[in-house]
Amino acid sequence: MKKVIWIVVVVLVVLFISGSCSAYNRMVTAEETVNTTWADVEAQYQRRSDLIPNLVNTVKGYAAHEQSTFTEVVEARAQAMSFKLDAADLTPEKLAEFQQAQQKVGSALGRLIAVAEQYPDLKANQNFLELQAQLEGTENRIAVARTRFNDATRQYNVTIRRFPANLIAGMFGFDQKAYFAAEEGAQTVPEVKF
């Protein structure tokens, strides 16, 4: 009888260990997916930052007296590029700071495009049109990358919160990740005035 009890105990221990290993490996996979999708988000923001100097220089040639707009775009870009956020440090506060820096870039770019709209020759310039199309495409890519990031984050957060995986997550320090959220006032249509 004691032999049967020991066999049952050994089987239960083996099942627990294999289940724990499986849960741990699922969490690692989910966390790496979050890290990868975060890198994709950063890559799209980098692409946008790389386009900005070309766009500013193209518009500068037509609207030299709009120096404050150019300065604002360049400063917002520099601030956003200096803000590095590691995938392991995706707290709601850090993500909000990152979003705020990127929002400033988006707002400044909107004003730059509004300035460009005042110059018919610029709007017909092939370089400007190509840069504007690339920028629009990049903004779409950013939206897609953010959606993928939020999907991966949701899957990760669900994985580490489910029982009994949450016990393993707690033992190995798997913490919830923050989501990208709409900026306050994002539902309000911006007003462009000339």
Image (cartoon, grey):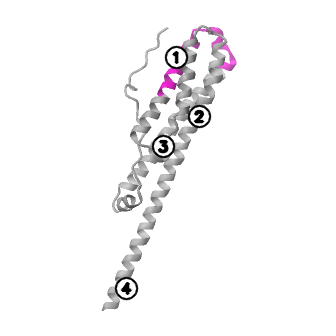
Q: CA distance from mark 4 to mark 2?
A: 58 Å
User: Quick one: label 2 or label 1, which is nearer the N terminus?
Assistant: 2
Find numbered disc 3 in the image and state the secondary structure of the residue it sits on: helix
Q: CA distance from mark 4 to mark 3?
A: 45 Å
Quarter of the image with the N terminus in it: bottom left
- By secondary structure, the bulk of the magenta-drawn segment is best described as helix
The residue under label 2 is which amino acid type? Gln
The residue under label 1 is which amino acid type? Arg
| Pointer 2 residue | 46
Look at the image and give the residue range highlighted in magenta.
103-128
Residue in the foreground of this view, choosing between 173 and 192:
173
Whether residues under marks 1 and 3 lie with C-beta atoms below 8 angstroms apart, the answer is: no
Q: CA distance from mark 2 to mark 1?
A: 20 Å
Task: Please tell me which residue is depicted at 51% across the width and 50% down the height of the picture.
Answer: 33
User: Quick one: label 4 or label 1, which is nearer the N terminus?
Assistant: 4
Q: CA distance from mark 4 to mark 1?
A: 73 Å
User: Quick one: label 4 or label 2, which is nearer the N terminus?
Assistant: 4
| Pointer 1 residue | 111
Whether residues under marks 2 and 3 lie with C-beta atoms below 8 angstroms apart, the answer is: no
Labels 4, 2: front one: 2
Q: Does 151 lie within the magenta span?
A: no
| Pointer 3 residue | 149
The residue under label 4 is which amino acid type? Ile
User: Quick one: label 4 or label 3, which is nearer the N terminus?
Assistant: 4
Asked where in the image residue 131 lies, by quadrant, the reply is top right
